[in-house]
Image (spheres, rainbow, N blue to C red):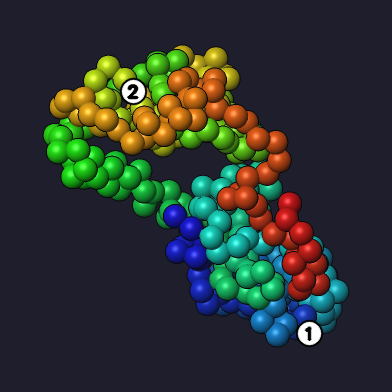
Amino acid sequence: MKAHEFMNSHPTTVTKAMTVEQVIKIMKETAHDGFPVIEGGKVFGIIAYEDIILQPLDKKVEEVMERRVVAIPPEMDMEAIARLMFRSGHSRFPVVDDKGNLLGLVTNSDVIRAHIERVTPLKVETLKKTLESLHNVKVTFLEDNLLLRNLIPTQGKIYKDELSAREYEITLGLAEPLLVVQNGQRYVLVDGHHRALGALRQGVEKMHCYILKLDHEVELGLEKTAEKMGLKTLDDIEILDGLSPYTLPLILENGVVKRLV
């Protein structure tokens, strides 16, 4: 689930030349408490209620707006946006292209909507149909708490920043179930590697799992790939320093994309 799927493609915006009085009027009309500041289609700032509350009515937006803007690319995952909102305290982010042009706006309401419509059930059903089609097996759906030490990973590398975020969520009890395929007596982890390794590092022994149990043992491509990568347990996953390219917001300064953060 990506930002461009849930963003408002036609958000209310203001210009640098507008006055505080005009912004207050727009806030009353829309019931919104903040807007991107746009010029020539580019985002030059953000103005929110707290920026104008004590300002003279005739003051220009350009004088009081926040010029350093945290924005997000259209392909950013909604889960990553939710974590960014949680960490930063911001309730909205402009969605921009690599030139700083406004594409839309994602708010905390959009994040909630994405969570309600999250793809976990779809992932389960899609994988179930794929397994049945490829391997001519009957697949049964189960839910159970599995020992993390018994899971065979299929992802060889994960990013440290993403892992740290998942570890924090686990301490708050926010972790979603893992997606696992049971092939004979083996449990192959398909989705949730960051959650699983994060939980293991937190001293958690078991996690709730969605399990797709095959009615007979088959040669899974996932297992062959894991074997080639030398993956037998979660401890074999390599943790990469730096920031995951799938969770990076953008920094805009005076309408220009300066750098990733």
Left or right: 186, with 205 as reference point: left
Please name the residue shown 59% across and 44% down the image: 83
Q: Secondary structure at mark 1?
A: loop
Percent coordinates x, y for residue 150 in the rendering: 40, 16
- The amino acid type found where label 1 is placed reads Ala
Q: Quadrant of the N terminus?
A: bottom left
- Quadrant of res 228: top left
Describe residue 125's horizontal placement relative to residue 196 as left or right: left
- Report the front residue among 195 and 127: 127
Placement of 85 over or under 216, stated as above or below: below
Residue 210 point in image, percent of width and height: 31, 31
At 50% across and 65% down in the image, what residue appears?
Answer: 4
Q: Quadrant of residue 90?
A: bottom right
Q: Amino acid at mark 2?
A: Tyr
Label ID, residue 187: 2
In the rendered structure, find residue 17 and report the number of the disc placed on it.
1
Q: Which residue is at 66% across, 69% downward? A: 98
Instruction: Assign a secondary structure to mark 2.
Output: strand
Of 234 and 24, nearer the camera is: 234
Q: Nearer the viewer, mark 1 or mark 2?
A: 2
Mark 1–mark 2 distance (CA, rounded to whole Å): 61 Å
- Dot 1 or dot 2: first in sequence order is 1
Q: Residue at x 24, y 20 (%)?
A: 184
The 10 Å Cα crowd at callout 1, few under 14, some 14 to 19, many 20 or more, is few
Whether residue 112 is visible: yes
Compared across the picture, whether 27 is left or right of 58 comes to left
